[in-house]
Image (cartoon, rainbow, N blue to C red):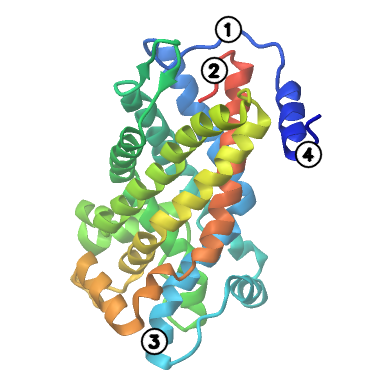
Amino acid sequence: MDNDPLKHWILKSNRMDRRPQLPPVSTTEPLTVRTVLQLYFNTFLGANFAESWVYPLDVAKTRMQVEGEEAKKTGAKVPNALATLKSIVKNEGPKTLYAGFSAMVARNLIFNSMRVVLYDVFRRKFIKVDENNKETLSVSSALSCGFVAGCIAQAMANPFDIVKVRMQTEGRRRLMGHRPRVTNMFDGFTGIYREGGLIRMWKGITPSCLRACLMTAGDVGSYDLSKRFFKKLLDLDDGLRLRFLSSMCAGLTASVLSNPADVIKSRVMNQQTDASGKNLTYRNSMHCLVKTVSEEGPLALYKGLLPCWFRLGPFSVLFWLSVEFLRDLEGQAGF
């Protein structure tokens, strides 16, 4: 008799996940306007639900990445994530933990929704059906689809990212005696426009898109691949346990891949400019990368990794479980 507890837990989980469902929609079937819109708004709702729980960690991550610049000048030590959160609450009030949340919600409507929909559209070109009528998708195809989808989505959402970063760091700037730069999302857009016109809205687009490419490949692509892998390995149905395990893997992969580009993006977007709109700290993204590594070492590219993982891990779980739940309600197959 097999007394392996892990095997018994998996078999029990599999039985619990076997519940009556409507006939699933295969990813090899043609897309319709309805299914595209459903996926688009499901991801928007799921992203905002997940973000509402983990957003303070995004604020802490951005603060840690930006404050590394100040620390290298003064010789001070950059506080850890917990100390950063405590400092924000103590010196600026708990409300600051959600600074820039309005810009994040607006960004989710473009970035998160668009990247998942585009990935779904792109991956259909690479899904193959074997002789057993099983769908297969190669690792390179999934990651490539995520890479391209993330780049396109971020290129459209970049202005919202700049405003979000500025709103997240505004409290710190005021404590240091700098003049107020942004009070709300719309004020942020007008301020950026005054600095250099519409083209200023795409400041830091290179590291921003690179981060989005890596994060989408690591999050969306990894989630898709993990579900296929664990479903076959553990013989699980497309239920809660399979989705939870896959989303945990996706969050970790996305954090490790995207953090270096995230550091560069935050610093480029947050830097000061003169009256003519000229950057005062970094000429461009490559200059920021070289300067950061040469002055602070390669590990500086992973500043804020812990809050990034603590944010993206739970975010991925809440996001994907929400999206999958909404798809179940609509009678669609799992993503």
Q: Which numbered circle lies on residue 5? A: 4
Please provide percent x and percent y for residue 123.
Answer: 34, 26
Left or right: where does residue 331 sit relative to residue 145?
right
Eye-nearest disc, 4 or 2: 4
The 10 Å Cα crowd at callout 3, few under 14, some 14 to 19, many 20 or more, is some
Q: Mark 4, residues whose alpha carbon is within 10 Å: few (<14), some, or many (≥20)? A: few
Q: Which residue is mark 1?
A: 23
User: Sequence order check: which comes first, mark 1 or mark 3?
Assistant: 1
Answer with mark 4 or mark 2, whichever residue precedes in sequence.
4
Disc with the residue nearer the chain's start (3 vs 4): 4
Q: Let me know if residue 277 appears in the view.
A: no
- Spot occupied by residue 144 in the image (x, y as percentages of width and height): 30, 38
Secondary structure, mark 2, is loop
Mark 3 residue type: Lys
The residue furthest front is: 1
> In the picture, residue 98 is in which quadrant?
bottom right
Q: CA distance from mark 3 to mark 4?
A: 51 Å
